[in-house]
Image: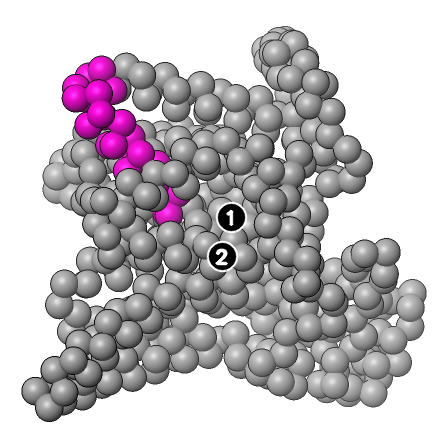
């Protein structure tokens, strides 16, 4: 471990130190969508089933005992409107999920976050059981503070690993300085802090990690990928989709490779028969890896819904196929990514500079980002409802880091002097970070569209940013300092 640390560059160490210094800002919690993601871990770990009854609601023990293994008893209980928990409002309509045909409370959230949390939460569970035996009296129910802290710390760690892998990928194509500041900029001037620190039970930090791992390994093995590497890439792709279904758009990267390989084989005709056969074998291995990696999702859907391809309520609500909200996704006053997190505009423009550095990587990132953007534009809940900016685009964190790093590198070449570029670009990045921190403070303190309802007055937002936020931060700090020590 010491040798690994000493072999790291100064900027790599700086990223690690920044992460350690940021840990006190974690707000351990399991909230909203997080209950759905976490229930895929808590229910089998604590209740030894996938009924989820104890994850949203605690019915009488007699009801639970009657419902176990008896779909009819479960139906009678959960079909009672007073006991239905998963009720959603969309476009002035109410959608209530009844009990499934297998007798389970429906849970349409993805299983990937639970898979990534499992080593940390399982260790916390073991520690709680041991502590309970020693008289600590900590409830081993999957909801007490050790579980929540383990989950929250794991989320922050996965978010950082996604940032670090993105930094390594960007450093391969631009100077390390620009890769570092692009990583720091996207880390603290986008919606990423919400996913890593403020809402750790959501899936977005895990999504950024899984996409970064996929793109990093895809690029690393790109020059001459062996059959084993194709299989491993497929397994990573399966995990990436387990975490968040929309991440399937990144499979475009190997899909484009496949298309090029077959086009080359077709041009060579007979001489290319061997190339086509080898390509087919590799691509079948990749496909098998994707299926195996995606099996946890398929298995849980079969158990809960009785159909491995069930989409739950996503198939029962109208999508925006006829009227995609392309403009609103980018420029909405409440959830537009370029309005709420303006650093992403520089990152997207930088993708065109990335195409000049590496055409294959640049166009792959551009096409994947465009496909993701189109998918969110037709998605019924495109706003993310309770969301700072547009939280869905946190999945594109590695793409944004690559784009911003390429933009910084391009600007440095225009100015012809790295020191001159640094004197201009670093303060700009810091300014965007400070601006984002102010916006995050407004969002978290209910000054700026906390519930996604109502109009946004940007004159009021700007006033808050320059007058209210600094005053409240100073007041909070003064109150904290003046607070008397707790009596033991």
Q: Residue at x 65, y 38 (%)?
A: 332
Kindly state the secondary structure of the residue where label 1 is placed.
helix
User: Which residue does the numbered mark 1 point to in the structure image?
Assistant: 393
Q: In this rendering, does residue 11 appear at all? A: no
Q: Is residue 417 magenta?
A: yes
Q: Nearer the viewer, residue 274 or 392?
A: 274
Q: Nearer the viewer, residue 467 or 16?
A: 467
User: Which residue does the numbered mark 2 point to in the structure image?
Assistant: 372
Q: Is residue 414 magenta?
A: yes
Image spot of residue 464 (x, y percent): 67, 16
Q: Is residue 392 above or below residue 281?
A: above
Image spot of residue 382 (x, y percent): 64, 52
Image: magenta residue range: 398-421
Colour scheme in use: one colour
Q: Residues within 10 Å of mark 2 (few under 14, many from 20)?
A: many
- What count of labels does the image hold? 2
Relative to 217, is 204 on the left or the right? right
Tell me the chief SS of the magenta region.
helix
Q: Residue at x 61, y 45 (%)?
A: 327
Task: Check the picture and name the quadrant holding the C terminus.
Answer: top right
Q: Which quadrant holds residue 36?
A: bottom right
Q: Residue at x 82, y 67 (%)?
A: 96
Relative to 135, is 456 on the left or the right? right
Task: Check the picture and name the quadrant holding the N terminus.
Answer: top left
Asked if the residue under mark 2 is in contact with the one under mark 1, i.e. CB atoms within 8 Å, the reply is yes
Q: Residue at x 68, y 68 (%)?
A: 314
Image spot of residue 391 (x, y percent): 57, 46
- Mark nearer the N terminus (1 vs 2): 2
Q: Residues within 10 Å of mark 1 (few under 14, many from 20)?
A: many
Image spot of residue 23 (x, y percent): 45, 34
The residues bearing labels 1 and 2 have C-alpha atoms spaced at a distance of 8 Å
């Amino acid at each position: 471990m010491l040798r690994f640390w000493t072999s790291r560059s100064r900027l790599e160490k700086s990223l690690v130190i920044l992460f350690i210094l940021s840990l006190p800002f974690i707000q351990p919690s399991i909230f909203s969508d997080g209950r759905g993601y976490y229930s895929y871990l808590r229910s089998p770990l604590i209740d030894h089933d996938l009924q989820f009854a104890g994850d949203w609601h605690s019915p009488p023990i007699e009801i639970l005992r009657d419902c176990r293994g008896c779909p009819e008893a479960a139906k009678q209980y959960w079909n009672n409107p007073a006991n239905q928990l998963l009720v959603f409002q969309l476009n002035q309509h109410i959608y209530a999920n009844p009990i499934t045909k297998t007798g389970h409370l429906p849970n349409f959230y993805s299983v990937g976050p639970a898979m990534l949390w499992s080593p940390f939460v399982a260790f916390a569970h073991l520690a709680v059981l041991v502590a309970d035996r020693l008289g600590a009296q900590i409830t081993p129910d999957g909801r007490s503070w050790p579980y929540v802290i383990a989950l929250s710390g794991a989320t922050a760690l996965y978010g950082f690993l996604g940032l670090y892998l993105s930094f390594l990928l960007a450093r391969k194509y631009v100077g390390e300085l620009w890769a570092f500041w692009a990583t720091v900029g996207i880390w603290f001037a986008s919606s990423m802090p919400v996913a890593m620190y403020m809402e750790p039970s959501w899936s977005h930090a895990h999504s950024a990690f899984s996409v970064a791992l996929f793109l990093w390994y895809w690029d690393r093995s790109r020059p001459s990928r062996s059959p084993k590497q194709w299989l491993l890439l497929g397994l990573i792709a399966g995990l990436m989709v387990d975490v968040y279904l929309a991440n399937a758009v990144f499979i475009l990267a190997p899909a484009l490779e496949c298309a090029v390989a077959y086009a080359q084989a077709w041009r060579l005709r007979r001489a290319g028969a061997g190339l086509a056969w080898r390509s087919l074998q590799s691509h079948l291995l990749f496909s098998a890896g994707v299926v195996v990696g995606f099996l946890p999702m398929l298995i849980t859907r079969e158990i809960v819904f009785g159909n491995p391809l069930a989409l739950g309520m996503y198939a029962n609500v109208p999508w925006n196929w006829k009227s995609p909200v392309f403009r609103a996704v980018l420029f909405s006053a409440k959830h537009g990514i370029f309005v709420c997190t303006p650093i992403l505009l520089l990152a997207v423009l930088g993708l065109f500079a990335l195409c000049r550095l590496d055409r294959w990587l640049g166009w792959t990132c551009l096409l994947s980002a465009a496909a993701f953007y189109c998918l969110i534009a037709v998605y019924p809940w495109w706003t993310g409802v309770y969301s700072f900016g547009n939280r869905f685009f946190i999945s594109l964190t590695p793409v944004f880091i690559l784009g911003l790093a390429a933009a910084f590198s391009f600007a440095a070449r225009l100015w012809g002097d790295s020191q001159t570029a640094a004197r201009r670009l670093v303060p700009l990045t810091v300014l965007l970070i400070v601006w984002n921190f102010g916006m995050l403070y407004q969002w978290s303190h209910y000054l700026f569209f906390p519930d996604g309802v109502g109009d946004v007055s940007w004159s009021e937002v700007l006033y808050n940013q320059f007058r209210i936020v600094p005053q409240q931060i100073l007041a909070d700090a003064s109150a904290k300092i003046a607070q008397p020590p707790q009596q033991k």
